[in-house]
Every structure is written in C-alpha cells, then in structure tokens.
Image: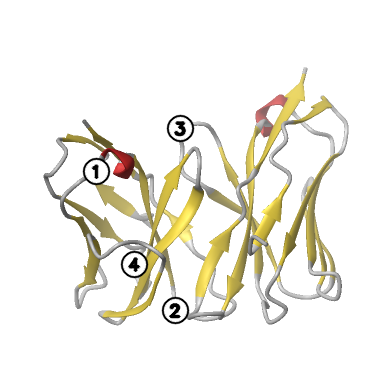
C-alpha cells in the first residue's frame, strides 16, 4: 500500500511569492492534516481536512490556506511568503477523524524562502 | 503551559541500556497517545499508539500511560545506535477542535 505522497520535495521561493504544496493520502484515508516543522517551534498544526471540509485550523495567519478534493488529495497554499516560512511542511493522513485515528506522515516538502 | 511537554534532551545512553522517554500533556480529555521517531532530515514515523492506562509492549518498545497523572512514557530496551533519533510524543485533543498535537521531541543518542 503506497504511503502519503507529497510534492514537490524541495523548493526555493523568493519573499513575496506564493507556493502550493500537494499531498496524496494513503488509499482509503479521508482525513488529511498539515503541519509545519521548524527547529525553533517543532511540529505545529496547520489544519485538518475531512471529506473536503476544513475541520480545524491552527494558529497561523490567513496567508496559509488549504483545500481537499473529492478524491481526498489535498493542497496547501502560502501566499506572500516571508523568510520565516522556511520550514519542512508535512502532510499526514488518517482513515477518519476523531480519537483513535492514527496519522501517518509523508516525506515532507522542504521550503526555503530567500 | 505547553499542551504536550517533553524534555528536549539530549538523552545519552550506552548501547544495550534502557532508554526512558517521558511526556506530559495538559488536556485531561485526551484519549489517544502516540510515539513517533524522527531521524534527522526525515519525516516522523509511528512507533506505537496507546489508549488505555498501563503498559503496551511491541518488541523492544514499551509505552506506558497514566491518565490520572497525564503522563506518557516510552521505554526502549536493549538500545541500539540505530535508535538514535528524536522521539516525538503526540496526543489527540478536542480542545478548540480535534487535532493531533506534538511535543517538541526528545533527542536520543545511543553510544556504541
């Protein structure tokens, strides 16, 4: 069974640009969560989508947005990039949402903002 | 108070010893708890999940949960150099909406 697939794996963007990251969950998984990981802040929850609906959102500015498609694939977008947005962005999928659902991570997208 | 707290380490143990990693959480309503391992430059991978008070063993790994004390731990027996990684404690919480939140992680070094 294929794991969570994230694209692109590595990218470099300039301040002020925008970026879109893509995530394909494990087959059969309907929930997708996004996390930002930086050395200083650790793993920070961005948002979760289930059945094309955003179920929860972390404490990030509105420049961070996402969506989920009917096939459960998800994208996240960051607009007006800042240097501090440089991070590893991790997508995780789980069969459903709620207690007892284990999340499984993709390999991540390494974003560098210069 | 952070929602999930871990000692950042580094925790250094000799090969063959038992490594003990600890985690506390603030949401008394949490019901699902997880340990992930993350090698440098890689994404977190699930080691174990635990839902009930007590111990859960899987090979060299034992997870321990005490909901009354809001405490989760991970024991690694017969530690190997390949166990050197950052260990992340994760908790499902429904405060402010359901999500899985992570501690900052404990770095473990196993010396050969």
Name the residue that disc number 3 marks: B41
The tag earlier along the polypeptide, 1 or 4, is 4
Q: Which mark is residue A82?
A: 1
> Which circle, 3 or 4, is nearer the viewer?
3
Name the residue that disc number 4 marks: A27
| Residue drawn at the location 38% of the way across and 44% of the way down | A107
Left/right of residue B89 with respect to residue B97 in the rendered view: right
Q: Are marks 1 and 3 in contact (CB under 8 Å)?
A: no
Secondary-structure class at tag 3 = loop
Q: Are marks 3 and 4 on the same chain?
A: no
Left/right of residue A30 with respect to residue B13 in the rendered view: left
The tag earlier along the polypeptide, 4 or 2, is 4
Marks 3 and 4, how far apart at CA: 25 Å
Q: Are marks 2 and 3 in contact (CB under 8 Å)?
A: no
Secondary-structure class at tag 1 = loop
Horizontal and vertical percent for residue A43?
A: 49, 51
Of all residues shown, which one is farthest toward the top?
A: B112
Marks 1 and 3, how far apart at CA: 22 Å
Horizontal and vertical percent for residue A28?
A: 36, 73
């Amino acid at each position: 069974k294929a794991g969570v697939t994230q694209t692109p794996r590595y990218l470099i963007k300039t301040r002020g640009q925008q970026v879109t990251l893509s995530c394909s969950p494990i087959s059969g998984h309907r929930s997708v969560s996004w996390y930002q990981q930086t050395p200083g802040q650790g793993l920070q929850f961005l948002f979760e989508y289930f059945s094309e609906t955003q179920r929860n959102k972390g404490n990030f500015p509105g420049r961070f947005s996402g969506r989920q498609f009917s096939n459960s694939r998800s994208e996240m977008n960051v607009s007006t990039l800042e240097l501090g947005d440089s991070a590893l962005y991790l997508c995780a999928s789980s069969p459903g949402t709620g207690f007892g659902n284990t999340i499984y991570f993709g390999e991540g997208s390494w974003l560098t903002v210069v | 108070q952070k929602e999930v707290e871990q000692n950042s380490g580094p925790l250094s143990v000799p090969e063959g010893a038992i490594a003990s990693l600890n985690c506390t959480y603030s949401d008394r309503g949490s019901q699902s708890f997880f340990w992930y391992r993350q090698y440098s430059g890689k994404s977190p991978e699930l080691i174990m999940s635990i839902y009930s008070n007590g111990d859960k063993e899987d090979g060299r790994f034992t997870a321990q949960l005490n909901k009354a004390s809001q405490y989760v731990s991970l024991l690694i027996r017969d530690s190997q150099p390949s166990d050197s990684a950052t260990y992340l404690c994760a908790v499902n919480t429904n405060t402010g909406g359901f999500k899985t939140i992570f501690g900052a992680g404990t770095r473990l070094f196993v010396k050969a």
